[in-house]
């Protein structure tokens, strides 16, 4: 007969002390070292806390992957140390757990909030506008129908609610005057970056919610320690951190999937009624969770599988109550938060079918493969590091030991991974939903592993599995933390276009014109800036010498367009020659290497004044505004600037053409009012046959914002009516404050006011 | 309370369930299975590597890979079984034996319903109805306009067919088939609509089991489910996209609600006298049931029953006759307050409007359709009507017996037993069945198809007949079951 090994007296004492509820024995290493447990562990906790604070503080100011890794390790150390302190002291354990949880959530929040405004006002991620534009349109028009269902509607509505709050705040702060201030589209750049900031904040909050929900589910299924480890792994999961900065549906879908799973766990744990029936409210709540998840992203609907399993795992009577109640609640919730899917059924079906076809048949450039199970595995290894194989081990442990709680966790990750791997397109962001489950599995595996390691007393100096966990966790976390930190560091670097804009606005005078190869929205309320993309066209259309002659002092050029031409002149010989001449002729003021945004070069063309086709000495008001000159010629669109190659009379126009009129204004003193510029086209009998009334620069640069002395170039193009009969027409201009009489116009200083307070500019011929 | 919580906690963790099952037996077989698995995997992998040299193997490389996968899966399952994991999982995922048998019955019933479903053509008499319904469903799918053009077909059926068509569209979306919903034709909706009917039929079987189990016993439930699973009429109905199967399901659903409500009323009102459980009046001492005081707990169940009755009426107006068992059940509860009657009526109207949401908005069209249907019946209060009924009784019985001989025979025996033993649960079934059958017999032209909504009721009674027979045989002194029971009680020699 086999005899049990007898326990040592120390073990016996410790066990009886545990039984009596007394303080447990100190860790072996502390006893061996001759220290009392509590002071050592308290000091360790304090050190870890200080390290965490220091790392976060330094990391925010001086980004560096190493610092952030240290931050992660310090956070882990803090968590472990507080746990140990909780064991050493007789304080209630749940207080320590709360402190550790707060530390974990705080670390996750720092990672997610850091660099939240990245890229703005540019929108580097192409998927953000897909949500933002629709939500903004809802606010502008009041039409709550998204009219497209490539994504379900829940997150769009949530974003719209946040934007409404932001608008309310913006009204009080003077940021917006009406809801129409919201831009029509934000595909490349936005004029309302605050909207993005608030919208991204919502994503961040949901990302933090994932940490808490993972903890909650882990705690309820496997105990608080597993919950804390899983929460820690989720807090540092690089893809969750990375996409947690974006207004896309992936992190919200992960949040609502985690919420659905949490409610499923609650349903699983809910006490049965005396006749062993599952109660209705937990069923309906779990169904609502499933519906919310599916209404955020269609593929999250697979979370319905654990819902189907719950009644079988609970041995409840009448499992149909869960299937029917949960299913109906899920369906009702989905259609409640995607309400226009029913009246717009054909659009809903066509859009959903387009997603299916895209993923299964069409493919997506380089994001497609036949071996996506391997592709996703590699990606998870690259981002999650050793946590990924540990999670696989955890899933295996769960499958083999076959506990009921494990069977609740297992189906979703397995089915979801298989479903993703079976598709043709491999967008890694679709893996987002898996991370809470992988973290749970990894935590289970780590716990199992550490318990086993703690039994090897010959190898380790301790039998405390918590200490073993503390030793192993940093090795697990350092990889994901470094990846997440590196991505965070990239995000805090401003976009080169934004950096250039800030530098130019701070260092350059505004008396000259700046030609910039960036979006015009980046330069609001700066009238001396002419964006090539909006009204000018390719800079190479004019020889470099043309620019100083027409008053363009600074050129901000996108090197990404010219460098390839320089390296391979055969590609674009004209552009290469032009840029080489610009390099030789102009002074390179600043060179911004590419990174976040394109590489840019800022050139100074030298001092000079703009030369207009028709100089003028006209005055408006009581010597308030001067018209320094104007160009008149053909234009191609409303905001096109017309600069002639040389002086001379413009060619004849045809009905339906654009009359290009570029005005050079010179405010002699700061204008006292917000004036509108009118341009009238008069026929031989003095009748107005076409007209335009607008603020300068297409209503974007009101005169009451003009500083004295700053020259303002204004595109005031006029559309000629298609039915305009041939003949001679006179172009006249003038200014007026809205609702009041016109400003007096004089042809030259000291002249008598012109009749009707309007200045005849030129006569054109319409053929 | 603490003890209960502790029990539930242990149940939740489930950590110790089946612990130790994986033991030496698993270890002993593990080595053999592993060697076999690795060898087979190696051989097949080598075959897989021999690219282009597998001409002797039908299917070439892919066949080798498939064979490897099948072998691997087989070995894995064998290993899991031998090592005890399958038993452990089965222990964790609890399914009652009768539930497992029901699953088997439903799976068997699925075979005739699903076989040849894609190519199934409806009988000529049902062709027009099917085409009308599918055309409407297609219009709804493509336009999103849910107001029915006709009320000749139940709106609920059209909505369900629209949903099945939408699901079929999404499942079939591809570059070379369709990517726009307008490309769908009514014929494309036929197979999903047939599949829908087949699934509704299977659901009816499960519901028959649940109702019969509640009324009689699990065994009676299984027998009733098996009877309905074998019903040739139900097989044929699965291949026609009309409302027969849906009406059968709705009728069964309403009866289930009424039975639930009726038995709860009986338990509540007479809890101090006797408990009604599984069709049998139990003793006066009912320890589980509280005294009948305070809020009548059965009222919500009555509302559900009224809702389901309204739903069934919205699908087929003739099912309004199911109000008879509901009134009977309510009568057991004694005098009811007017407010509760009003609530029941409201629930019924809500159920009706759920099934036919545009009934009020398009009332004239709805009434026209109802009048057109009613003209098919002889509903006059004249001697001629009685004569028609008398003439149709043997005709209908003959017709139904030809179409459903087993169900007709066993259903009749079951009805006889129900009449003889006079239990309250049986009255509910009879009150549901008899008025409906009488209405069918008043139809000017009899057709076996008209009996479909009432086949579940007959299956219930057939299950009762078989169960009674089984019980009688088991109680016989020479029966095998009784002998086994006696031998189990006898103490062993050891």
Image (cartoon, coloured by chain):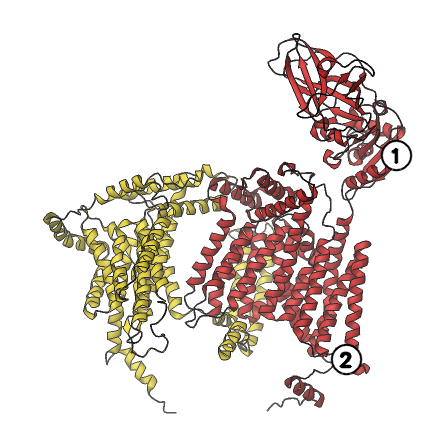
> Looking at the image, which residue is at 81% across and 40% down?
A502
Query: A75 or A440: nearer the eye?
Result: A75
- Are tags 1 and 2 found on a single chain? yes
What colour denotes chain B?
Answer: yellow
Chain of residue at mark 1: A
Horizontal arrangement in the rendering, residue A127 relative to residue B240 (left or right): right
Q: Where is residue A113 in the image (x, y as percent from the top left)?
A: 71, 53
Nearest to the observer: residue B35 or residue A279: A279
Identify the mark at residue A509; answer none if there is no mark: none
In the rendered view, does B93 fall on the left or right side of B261? Answer: right
Q: Which of B7 and B406 is in front in this view?
A: B7
Q: How far apart are marks 1 and 2 (CA)?
A: 65 Å
Q: The red chain is which one?
A: A
Identify which residue is drawn at 58% across, 62% down: B41
Q: Residue A392, can we see it?
A: no
Which residue is disc 1 drawn over? A588
Chain bearing tag 2 is A
In the rendered image, which quarter is residue A412 located in? bottom right
Give the mark nearer the N terminus: 1 vs 2: 2
Residue A656 rendering spot, x and y as whole percentages: 63, 17
Q: In which quarter of the image is the N terminus of chain A?
A: bottom right
Where, by quadrant of the figure, is residue A256 drawn? bottom right
Q: Mark 2 points at which residue?
A: A37
- Quadrant containing the C terminus of chain A is top right
Rendered position, B366 above or below A622: below
């Amino acid at each position: 007969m086999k005899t049990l090994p007898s326990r040592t007296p120390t073990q016996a004492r410790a066990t009886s002390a545990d039984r009596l509820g007394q303080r447990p024995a100190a860790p072996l290493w502390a006893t061996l070292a001759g220290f009392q447990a509590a002071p050592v562990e308290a000091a360790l906790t304090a050190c870890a806390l200080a390290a965490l604070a220091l790392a976060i503080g330094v990391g925010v100011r001086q980004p560096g992957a190493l610092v952030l890794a240290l931050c992660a390790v310090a956070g882990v150390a803090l968590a472990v140390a507080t746990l140990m302190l909780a064991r050493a002291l007789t304080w209630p354990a749940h207080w320590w757990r709360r402190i550790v949880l707060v530390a974990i959530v705080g670390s996750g929040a720092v990672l997610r909030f850091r660099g939240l405004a990245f890229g703005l006002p540019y929108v580097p991620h192409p998927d953000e506008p897909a949500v933002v534009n629709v939500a903004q349109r809802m606010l502008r028009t009041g039409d709550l129908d998204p009219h497209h269902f490539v994504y379900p509607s829940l997150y769009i509505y949530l974003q719209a609610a946040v934007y409404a709050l932001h608008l309310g705040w913006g009204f009080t702060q003077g940021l917006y005057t009406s809801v129409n201030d919201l831009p029509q589209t934000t595909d490349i750049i936005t004029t309302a970056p605050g909207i993005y900031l608030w919208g991204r904040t919502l994503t961040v909050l949901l990302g933090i919610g994932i940490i808490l929900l993972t903890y909650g589910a882990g705690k309820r299924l496997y105990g608080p320690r597993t919950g804390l480890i899983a929460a820690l792994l989720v807090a540092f999961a690089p893809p969750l951190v990375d996409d947690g900065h974006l207004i896309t549906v992936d992190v919200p879908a992960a949040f609502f999937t985690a919420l659905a799973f949490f409610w499923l766990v609650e349903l699983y744990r809910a006490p049965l009624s005396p006749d062993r029936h599952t109660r209705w409210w937990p069923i309906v709540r779990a169904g609502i969770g499933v519906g919310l998840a599916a209404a955020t992203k269609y593929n999250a609907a697979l979370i319905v599988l654990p819902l189907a399993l719950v009644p079988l795992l609970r041995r409840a009577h009448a499992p149909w109550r869960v299937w029917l109640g949960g299913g109906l609640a899920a369906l009702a919730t989905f259609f409640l938060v995607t309400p226009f899917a029913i009246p717009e059924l054909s659009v809903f079906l066509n859009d959903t079918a387009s997603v299916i076809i895209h993923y299964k048949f069409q493919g997506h450039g380089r994001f497609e493969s036949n071996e996506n199970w391997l592709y996703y595995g590699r990606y998870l290894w690259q981002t999650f590091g050793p946590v990924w194989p540990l999670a696989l081990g955890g899933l295996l442990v769960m499958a083999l030991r076959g506990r009921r709680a494990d069977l609740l966790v297992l189906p979703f990750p397995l089915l979801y991974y298989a479903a993703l791997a079976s598709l043709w397109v491999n967008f890694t962001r679709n893996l987002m939903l898996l991370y809470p489950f992988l973290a749970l599995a990894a935590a289970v595996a780590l716990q199992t592993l550490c318990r086993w390691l703690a039994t090897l007393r010959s190898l380790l100096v301790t039998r405390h599995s918590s200490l073993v966990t503390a030793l192993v966790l940093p090795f697990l976390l350092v990889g994901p933390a470094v990846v997440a930190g590196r991505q965070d560091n990239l995000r805090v670097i401003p976009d080169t276009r934004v950096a250039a804009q800030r530098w130019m606005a701070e260092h350059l005078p505004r008396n000259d014109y700046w030609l910039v190869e960036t979006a015009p929205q980046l330069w609001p309320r700066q009238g001396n800036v002419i964006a090539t993309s909006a009204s000018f066209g390719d800079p190479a259309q004019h020889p470099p010498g043309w620019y100083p002659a027409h008053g363009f002092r600074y050129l901000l050029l996108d090197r990404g367009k010219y460098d390839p031409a320089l390296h391979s002149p055969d590609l674009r010989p004209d552009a290469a020659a032009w840029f080489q001449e610009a390099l030789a002729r102009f002074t390179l003021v600043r060179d911004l290497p590419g990174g976040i945004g394109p590489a840019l070069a800022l050139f100074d063309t030298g001092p000079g004044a703009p030369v207009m086709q028709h100089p003028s000495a006209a005055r408006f008001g009581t010597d308030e505004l001067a018209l320094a000159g104007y160009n008149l010629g053909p234009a191609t669109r409303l905001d096109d600037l017309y600069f002639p190659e040389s002086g001379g009379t413009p060619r004849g126009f045809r009905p339906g053409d654009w009359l290009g009129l570029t005005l050079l204004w010179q405010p002699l003193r700061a204008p006292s009012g917000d004036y509108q510029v009118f341009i009238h086209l008069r026929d031989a009998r003095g009748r107005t046959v076409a007209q335009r009334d607008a603020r300068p620069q297409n209503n974007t640069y009101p005169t009451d914002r003009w500083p004295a002395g700053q020259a303002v170039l204004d595109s005031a193009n006029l559309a000629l009516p298609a039915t305009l009969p041939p003949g001679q027409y006179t172009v006249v201009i003038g200014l007026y404050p809205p609702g009041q009489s016109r400003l007096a116009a004089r042809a030259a200083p000291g002249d008598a006011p012109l009749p009707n307070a309007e200045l005849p500019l030129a006569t054109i011929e319409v053929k | 309370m603490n003890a209960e919580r502790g029990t539930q906690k242990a149940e939740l963790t489930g950590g110790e369930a089946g612990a130790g099952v994986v033991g030496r037996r698993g270890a002993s077989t593990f080595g053999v299975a592993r060697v076999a698995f690795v060898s087979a995997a190696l051989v097949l992998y080598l075959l897989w590597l021999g690219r282009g040299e597998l001409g002797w193997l039908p299917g070439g490389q892919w066949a080798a890979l498939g064979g490897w996968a099948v072998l691997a899966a087989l070995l894995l399952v064998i290993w899991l079984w031998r090592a005890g994991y399958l038993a452990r999982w089965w222990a964790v995922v609890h399914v009652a034996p009768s539930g497992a048998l029901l699953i088997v019955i439903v799976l068997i019933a699925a075979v005739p319903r699903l076989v040849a479903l894609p190519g199934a053509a409806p009988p000529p008499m049902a062709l027009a109805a099917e085409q009308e319904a599918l055309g409407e469903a297609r219009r709804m799918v493509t336009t999103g306009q849910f107001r029915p053009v006709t009320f000749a077909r139940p709106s609920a059926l059209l909505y369900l067919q629209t949903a099945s068509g939408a699901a079929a569209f999404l499942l079939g979306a591809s570059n070379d088939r369709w990517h726009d919903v307008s490309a769908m034709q009514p014929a494309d909706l036929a197979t999903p609509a047939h599949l829908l009917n087949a699934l509704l039929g299977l659901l009816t079987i499960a519901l028959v089991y649940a109702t019969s189990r509640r009324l009689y016993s699990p065994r009676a439930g299984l027998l009733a489910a098996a009877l309905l699973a074998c019903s040739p009429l139900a097989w044929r109905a699965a291949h026609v996209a009309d409302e027969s199967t849906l009406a059968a399901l709705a009728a069964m659903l309403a009866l289930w609600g009424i039975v639930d409500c009726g038995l709860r009323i009986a338990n509540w009102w007479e809890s101090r006298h006797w408990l009604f459980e599984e069709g049998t009046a139990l003793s006066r001492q009912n320890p589980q049931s509280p005294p009948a005081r305070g809020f009548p707990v059965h009222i919500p169940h009555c509302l559900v029953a009224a809702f389901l009755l309204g739903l069934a009426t919205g699908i087929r107006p003739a099912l309004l006759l199911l109000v008879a068992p509901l009134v009977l059940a309510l009568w057991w509860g004694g005098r009811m307050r007017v407010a509760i009657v009003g609530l029941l009526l409201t629930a019924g109207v809500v159920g009706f409007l759920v099934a036919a949401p545009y009934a009020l908005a398009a009332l004239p069209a709805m009434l026209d359709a109802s009048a057109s249907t009613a003209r098919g019946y002889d509903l006059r209060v004249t001697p001629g009507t009685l004569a028609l009924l008398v003439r149709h009784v043997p005709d209908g019985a003959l017709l139904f017996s030809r179409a459903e001989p087993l169900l007709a025979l066993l259903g009749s025996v079951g009805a006889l037993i129900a009449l003889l033993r006079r239990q309250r649960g049986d009255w509910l079934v009879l009150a549901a069945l008899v008025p409906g059958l009488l209405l069918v017999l008043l139809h000017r032209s009899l057709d076996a198809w008209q009996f479909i909504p009432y086949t579940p009721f007959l299956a219930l009674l057939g299950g009762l007949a078989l169960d009674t027979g089984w019980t009688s045989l088991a109680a016989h002194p020479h029966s095998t079951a009784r002998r086994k029971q006696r031998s189990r009680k006898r103490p062993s020699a050891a």
